[in-house]
Amino acid sequence: MDGRSLTVFAAAAAIGAGFYVFLAPDEKKKKKGTKKDQPPGLMNLGNTCFMNSILQGMAFLPSFISWLQDFSVHDGEDKPLAILAIELKKLLKALNNGCMDGEDLIYPESVLRALYSHGWVIPSEQQDAHEFFHVLSSTLDDEMGKIPDVMNLSDIVTVECPVKFDSYDSLSLSLPSVFQMGLTLEDLLQAFVCSETVDSVYCGGCRQQNSVQSTSAVKTKFIKRLTFGKLPQCLCIHIQRTYWRNNGIPYKNKLFIKFPEFLDMEPFLYEPLDGSSCKRSKLSVMKNVEPEADTSADLNGFLDELVTSFVKTNKGSTSRAIYKLMAVVVHMGTVDDGHYITYRRYITEHASKWLYTSDEHVEATSRDQVFSSCAYMLFYERAGRWSDAVSSSNNVQ
């Protein structure tokens, strides 16, 4: 396998079963409405809420959208157009500006066609939103070859062997096997980076004193730890919620995980191992600064100022490790059936607000509603990029 996490929607037993893709006719007219200062919704083309939730979640990631805009669609005459990148750029732009042009509903069939041109076939049944995110990222990687890594993780580390880095397009965090109340996203991250000692592992790179002349691999003790070697501009976090009982029956873990508006990733960055066990670094004090009421645009200005203040007073953190929450994808229902919705940010010349999006339906919602949701996926953006985006938006005439 290559280093990327590729996902196939259809099971091996179903290959050749004649799957089909839901596509809306080209000639369908987009609905017109009178909604102001609000982005459009996305038409459900038949169990495609998993796709709509991801598209809405990615709609307000400034650095990702900027990257799409800056990338040349032609990369030499011998290479095809970056079809998905082109269609995705158009759709994400419309999701932020559509209503201003009189459109309050968009048909996303162009994205499905672009994926279909790359050989992806999506069954008619409900699919997983996180898997669809993998499909988008891997296809963009195929088209462009230089898609920015969401994160780099160090895999297995020994004292004498170099660190191994692998690239992933998202970070999947597991929930504890034993039920625990009051868990936070930082708790899951801390569990993710804890060290584990593994004995008697064959290593071709190690040279033991008793086998100096040997060229074969020898057994040695490893310290296994996954940490973040390089932080991205956009950070996608997936909270695994499907698990299996002893009898093999899957179930959905609905445990609430408290997540911050500002996430400090500094405590989870890679540092050379010193042989000590996993220690809990002091986490961001900002996770305790959570106003009880929704105070609209003034709150976001206050929190953006808080980032600068926090960085100055916490020498262990840097602004490049502070992330601002942009969207939350939620799965409602059971492991076998359900519906995906997305809470996402939206800014205009006059205000910044949270929106509830469910396919065609889009409405303003409260901050409390967002942060009390049972998150399945979280989209974060570097705080500096967020501040730039807000400043740029506020300067629009």
Image (cartoon, rainbow, N blue to C red):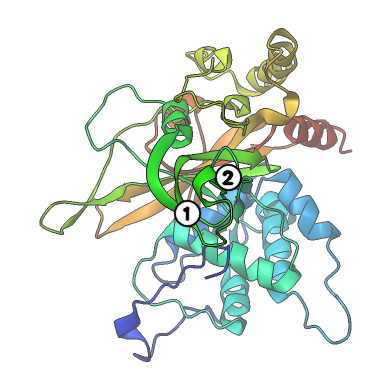
Residue drawn at (61%, 81%) of the image: 118
Disc nearer the start of the sequence (2/1): 2
The residue tagged with tag 2: helix, strand or loop?
strand
In the foreground, 291 or 3: 3
119 above or below 157? below
Q: Which amino acid does the dot numbered 1 rest on?
A: Val
The location of residue 72, given as percent across then percent down, is: 86, 67
Question: Of circles 2 and 1, which is in front?
Answer: 1
Which residue is farthest left?
A: 247
Q: In this image, 179 relative to 307: left or right?
A: left
Residue that mark 1 sits on: 218
The location of residue 304, given as percent across then percent down, is: 71, 21
Residue drawn at (26%, 43%) of the image: 253
What is the crowding at mark 1: few (fewer than 14 residues within 10 Å), some, or many (at least 20)?
Answer: some
Q: Which amino acid does the dot numbered 2 rest on?
A: Ser
C-alpha span from label 2 to label 1: 22 Å
Q: Which quarter of the image is occupied by the C terminus?
A: top right
The answer to which image quadrant residue 25 occupies is bottom right
Residue drawn at (65%, 40%) of the image: 229
What is the crowding at mark 2: few (fewer than 14 residues within 10 Å), some, or many (at least 20)?
Answer: many
Residue that mark 2 sits on: 154
